[in-house]
Image (tube, grey):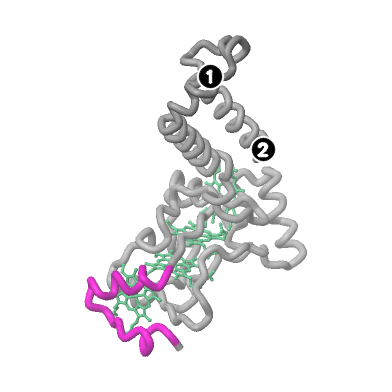
Amino acid sequence: MELLIIAVSLMALVILAVLIGTGGKPLLLVTSFTAVRESLWRNKMPLLGSSVTVLLVLMFLYLFYLTPGTRIGPEQPIPFSHRIHAGVKAIQCEFCHPFVERSINPGIPPVEKCLYCHNYIIANHPRIQKIHEYFNSNTPIPWRKVFYLPEHVLFNHQRHIKKEIKCRRCHGPIETMDRIQRKQLKMGFCVECHEKKNANVGCWLACHS
Ligand code: HEC
Ligand code: HEC
Ligand code: HEC
Ligand code: HEC
């Protein structure tokens, strides 16, 4: 894919050069080559400008459309969708992450909880059958973790949720995502809000162990 894009952009640049060099009459390239070369030289600034533009546009398109993997979260063992569950079906976050207010660990729902509904809802769907496989073999579903902090950072949901900070403030609009996307939680992000809300910014005491 990358090679194709490079080839296309090089071709675009060559065509552009020929068009500018010949003032829009590409046949001149055959009949009077030196004139074309001089004309190219005279127009070198606009040529450079448009080449850079073309390259930037292509780079943007590439990053934006052709690398979805960077904007959609990691693939999960079962394609569980927050958009369907928390969005379309409006199941409360706390139903599946019940300890978020009480403990350091919000809790990822165990297989049993999926089956609590899916023994009845679309029970024969192949993806639901896969949940049964985990259940029958007594293995927890190996979900891949999306959000994490460096080990030396202390974080506790409880204090934040008591202050009515919404989940989306830190996690983004989870209820619109099929696959959860990671959002970088850099230290500046924590500190910025702590300063605004007059929370503890003595971070070496408060957040770092
Ligand atoms: C409170 C009930 C409930 C719970 C709990 C629940 N689901 Fe669902 N799930 C639903 C509903 C409702 C649908 C939509 C069914 C439909 O499309 O008709 C659904 C759809 C799905 C689908 C199909 C989505 C698609 O691609 O069409 C999968 C897969 C799924 N759930 C997996 C899970 C897993 C894994 C868990 C446990 C972590 C889980 N569900 C927990 C209610 C639930
Ligand atoms: C039907 C159950 C269910 C509901 C409702 C639900 N979640 Fe989840 N959540 C899961 C499962 C299963 C995972 C693990 C798989 C994954 O990451 O997609 C998860 C993972 C997450 C993670 C990523 C954890 C990590 O670091 O790996 C976040 C953040 C999250 N949920 C937030 C929310 C929020 C916010 C809501 C409400 C808007 C919500 N969830 C509603 C089942 C649910
Ligand atoms: C102030 C920011 C903040 C808010 C608000 C917040 N979270 Fe989190 N959440 C985090 C951070 C940071 C992590 C990663 C923690 C870690 O790695 O120890 C995380 C991790 C998680 C996880 C994964 C836990 C695991 O064991 O993998 C879930 C699930 C989750 N959050 C759900 C929620 C839900 C639901 C809400 C809203 C009720 C919420 N969060 C609100 C910052 C926040
Ligand atoms: C949107 C605002 C907001 C963001 C973002 C936020 N916090 Fe907080 N945090 C607060 C507030 C408000 C309090 C004070 C809660 C209280 O007074 O009980 C707090 C309290 C804390 C405490 C307890 C401090 C103490 O006094 O013992 C820790 C630890 C903490 N936050 C860590 C973090 C980390 C780590 C992050 C980044 C991943 C983060 N917070 C992001 C608003 C935020």
Examine the residues drawn in magenta and state their main secondary structure. Answer: helix
Counting from the top left corner in percent of width and height, residue 172 is at 41, 56
- The residue at 49%/73% (across/down) is 149
Between 95 and 20, the residue placed more toward the observer is 20
- Judge whether 6 appears above or below 175 on screen: above
Asked if residue 167 lies left or right of residue 140, the reply is: left
Between 107 and 50, the residue placed more toward the observer is 50
Task: Verify whether residue 196 appears in magenta.
Answer: yes
Q: Amino acid at mark 1?
A: Val
Between 75 and 10, the residue placed more toward the observer is 10
Asked if residue 11 lies left or right of residue 90, the reply is: right
Between 16 and 128, the residue placed more toward the observer is 16
- The residue at 56%/27% (across/down) is 12
Asked if residue 41 lies left or right of residue 1, the reply is: left
Q: Going from the N terminus, do you reach mark 2 or mark 1 first?
A: 2
For the question of whether residue 119 can be seen, the reply is no
- The residue at 47%/37% (across/down) is 52
Magenta part of the protein: which range?
A: 186-208
Report which residue position mark 1 lands on: 36
Q: Residues within 10 Å of mark 2 (few under 14, many from 20)?
A: few
Report which residue position mark 2 lands on: 1
